[in-house]
């Protein structure tokens, strides 16, 4: 009799645990939908398709080789990103193993509907653009990419022509160009003005605002979507603020900024020409902070000016 009682108790415990697990699994899509619905989205000017304003960068942070613990840790970052309703993930063959790490994560998690895959081609030394596309698609485990960009304008005439062919074949949806660290802005402007491109990726943050004078207005004029890289200036900007300053009370009340991630990212994505910022991180808690910045309220033009003055005063 005692044995039967134990069996029944164990069975009830098992069924209770199974029920809890199934309930948690059932809640995952709901949580993702709820998170996704709360994110601010901006339209890609070429098509009207909307992207969440906070994406995920992989420069340095996802170059972890084949270390199993680091691969699983980055997978958790990707999992959290998609649970928040994240869309654009940006990578490059120049980022070492980052494309392979994304492939590992997507194989483990599955490919969510919200994924907007953004990759780059960079030099004939890495093979033709078509060869690079095939290699990168295999590394990600995807049949196609949403966006393929010419990395830092390297051989851009030849590369853009090849990307246009891939786009015509339906292998990629959008094509673009990139630059960073404020480099080659004059040439970048010429390509934006004359080239048939959908996206421009450039460095823009609250301490590096050179692109406000010409490149961002040109993007609006030409209907080019903008991705802002280095939103934290390689991490230095936000680390310094977190160590020495508190988010001012007026920023909470007027701009919806509870954290420095809010402050720095909301400043970027509230610019009318910017579609998406791509902070990179190795930590889920930082990813969660980043994604919260993608929710309204967004700073007004007056609040943006006040944010700049505050940072310049420190």
Image: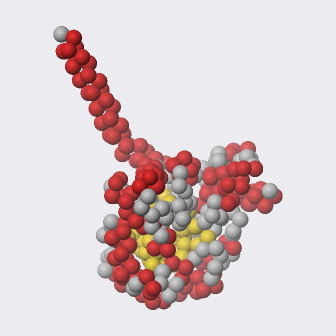
Residue 128 located left or right of residue 186:
left
Quarter of the figure with the C terminus:
bottom right
Seen from the viewer's position, the closer of residues 173 and 283 is: 283
Inspect this view and state whether residue 87 appears: yes
Q: Residue at x 62, y 56 (%)?
A: 266
Measured as percent of width and height from the top left, residue 80 is found at 46, 49
Q: Residue at x 44, y 58 (%)?
A: 67
Q: Residue furthest front?
A: 67
Measured as percent of width and height from the top left, residue 155 is found at 50, 87
Measured as percent of width and height from the top left, residue 262 is found at 62, 52
Q: Is residue 149 above or below residue 24?
A: below
Quarter of the figure with the N terminus:
top left
Q: Residue furthest bottom?
A: 158
Measured as percent of width and height from the top left, residue 98 is found at 46, 66
Q: Residue furthest right?
A: 313
Q: Quadrant of residue 209?
A: bottom right
Q: Residue at x 48, y 70 (%)?
A: 96
Q: Is residue 116 above or below residue 156?
A: above
Q: Quadrant of residue 172?
A: bottom left
């Amino acid at each position: 009799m005692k044995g039967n009682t134990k069996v029944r108790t164990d069975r009830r415990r098992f069924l209770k645990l199974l029920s809890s697990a199934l309930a948690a699994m059932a809640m995952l899509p709901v949580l993702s939908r709820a998170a996704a619905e709360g994110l601010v989205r901006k339209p890609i000017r070429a098509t009207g398709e909307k992207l969440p304003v906070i994406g995920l960068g992989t420069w340095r942070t996802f170059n972890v080789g084949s270390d199993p613990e680091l691969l699983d840790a980055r997978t958790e970052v990707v999992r959290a990103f998609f649970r928040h309703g994240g869309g654009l993930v940006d990578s490059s063959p120049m980022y070492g193993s980052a494309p392979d790490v994304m492939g590992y994560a997507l194989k483990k998690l599955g490919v969510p509907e919200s994924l907007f895959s953004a990759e780059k081609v960079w030099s004939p030394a890495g093979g033709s653009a078509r060869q690079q596309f095939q290699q990168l698609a295999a590394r990600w485990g995807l049949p196609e990419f949403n966006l393929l960009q010419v990395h830092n304008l390297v051989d851009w005439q030849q590369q853009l022509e090849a990307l246009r062919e891939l786009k015509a074949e339906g292998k990629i949806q959008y094509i673009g160009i990139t630059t960073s660290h404020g480099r080659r802005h004059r040439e970048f402007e010429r390509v934006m003005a004359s080239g048939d491109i959908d996206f421009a990726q450039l460095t823009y943050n609250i301490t590096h605002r050179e692109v406000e004078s010409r490149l961002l207005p040109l993007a609006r004029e030409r209907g080019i979507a903008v991705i802002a890289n280095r939103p934290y200036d390689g991490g230095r900007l936000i680390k310094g603020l977190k160590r020495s300053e508190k988010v001012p009370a007026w920023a909470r009340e007027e701009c919806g900024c509870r954290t420095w991630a809010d402050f720095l990212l909301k400043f970027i994505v509230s610019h009318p020409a910017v579609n998406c910022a791509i902070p990179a991180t190795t930590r889920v808690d930082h990813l969660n902070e980043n994604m919260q910045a993608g929710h309204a309220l967004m700073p007004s033009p007056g609040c943006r000016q006040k944010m700049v003055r505050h940072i310049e005063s420190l």
